[in-house]
Image (spheres, grey):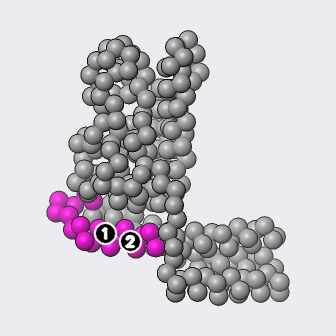
């Protein structure tokens, strides 16, 4: 995931498909004040540049903004960026540059941890497409019907735990979670295809993102139930 930064303004499907059109978070080198373009290392004085708070995780790792990512490319991108910014490679640099590399390295690690998990990646992707802050930290609320369904399932799982044990409870829970997770992964392909289409249907894309968000939130609630089962075993 390793290009220039972008602004936190609302993103469209067009500039998601063309990351080179994004705004850069840094255009002037902090050290020599030469123009940088989209470079993270100044070509003139070879000083590392800060990412800035507006950089998104995809651009930090130099990867396309997609829900479906090749794990091999993700790992390769992470290792490449780690070699560039790891503090151990900048021991002899100035105090300012060491601070920059430490901050950049931390963001590289955070971007990798987020994007390697498909469900965290999907949550982040939705916020990114909607133009929300680069590192959103809020949770949506499930519709009342879904909440009622989960509460009823919770009562059923508690009964199974007390009568048949955690294995039976987890098996029942997985019978609900597995189809939702399959639907989530199917949504990845649908949304990526919509973003790559020559003629984009913004309304269809918006509906697909809303559907994916709902499935992700429901899975999050179910994941909490799974955690409770494992803690009880």
Q: Is residue 86 visible?
A: no
Q: Secondary structure at mark 1?
A: helix
- Residue 47 at x, y percent in the picture: 41, 18
* Residue at the image point whose x is 43% and y is 29% from the top: 50
Viewer-closest of 129 and 118:
129
Expressed as whole percent of the image width and height from the top left, the position of residue 60 reads 42, 39
The vertical placement of 221 against 6, above or below, is below
Q: Which residue: 66% across, 69% down?
A: 224
Asked whether, in this view, residue 158 is left or right of residue 132, the answer is: right
Marks 1 and 2: CB-CB under 8 Å? Answer: yes
The answer, for residue 160, to whether it is visible in the render is yes
Q: Is residue 210 magenta?
A: yes
Estimate the x, y position of residue 207 in percent, counting from the top left: 32, 73
Circle on res. 206 = 1
Residue 53, by quadrant, is top left
The range drawn in magenta is: 195-214
Q: Position of residue 152 (x, y in %)?
A: 65, 88
Identity of the residue drawn at 31% across and 51% down = 9
| Camera-side residue of 229 and 139 | 139
* Helix, strand or loop for the magenta stretch, by majority: helix
Q: In this rendering, is residue 47 above or below 118?
A: above
Q: Which residue is mark 2?
A: 210
> Looking at the image, which is closer to me, 112 or 146?
146
The vertical placement of 4 against 48, above or below, is below
Q: Count residues near mark 2 (Cα–Cα under 10 Å), then give few for <14, some for 14-19, many for 20+.
A: few
Relative to 51, 92 lies left or right: right
Does the magenta run of residues contain 12? no
* Residue in front for this viewpoint, 25 or 82: 25
Side (left or right) of 46 relative to 35: right
User: Where the C terminus falls, by quadrant?
Assistant: bottom right
Q: CA distance from mark 1 to mark 2?
A: 6 Å
Residue at left 34%, top 31%?
A: 26
């Amino acid at each position: 995931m390793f290009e220039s930064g972008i602004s936190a303004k609302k993103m469209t499907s067009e500039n998601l498909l063309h990351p080179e059109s994004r705004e850069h978070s840094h255009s002037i080198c902090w050290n020599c004040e030469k123009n940088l373009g989209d470079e993270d290392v100044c070509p003139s004085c070879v000083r590392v540049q800060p990412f800035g708070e507006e950089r998104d995780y995809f651009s930090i790792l130099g990867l396309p903004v997609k829900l479906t990512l090749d794990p091999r490319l993700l790992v390769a991108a992470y290792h490449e960026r780690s070699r560039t910014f790891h503090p151990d490679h900048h021991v002899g640099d100035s105090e300012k540059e060491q601070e920059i590399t430490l901050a950049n390295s931390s963001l590289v690690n955070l971007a990798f941890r987020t994007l390697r998990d498909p469900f965290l990646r999907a949550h982040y992707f939705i916020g990114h497409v909607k133009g929300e802050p680069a590192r959103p930290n809020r949770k949506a609320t499930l519709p009342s019907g879904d909440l009622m369904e989960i509460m009823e399932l919770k009562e059923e799982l508690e009964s199974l735990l007390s009568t048949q044990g955690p294995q039976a409870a987890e098996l029942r829970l997985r019978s609900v979670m597995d189809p939702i997770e399959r639907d989530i992964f199917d949504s990845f392909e649908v949304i990526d295809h919509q973003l790559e289409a020559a003629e984009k249907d913004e309304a269809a894309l918006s509906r697909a993102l809303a559907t994916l968000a709902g499935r992700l939130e429901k899975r999050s609630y179910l994941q909490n139930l799974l955690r409770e089962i494992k803690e009880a075993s």
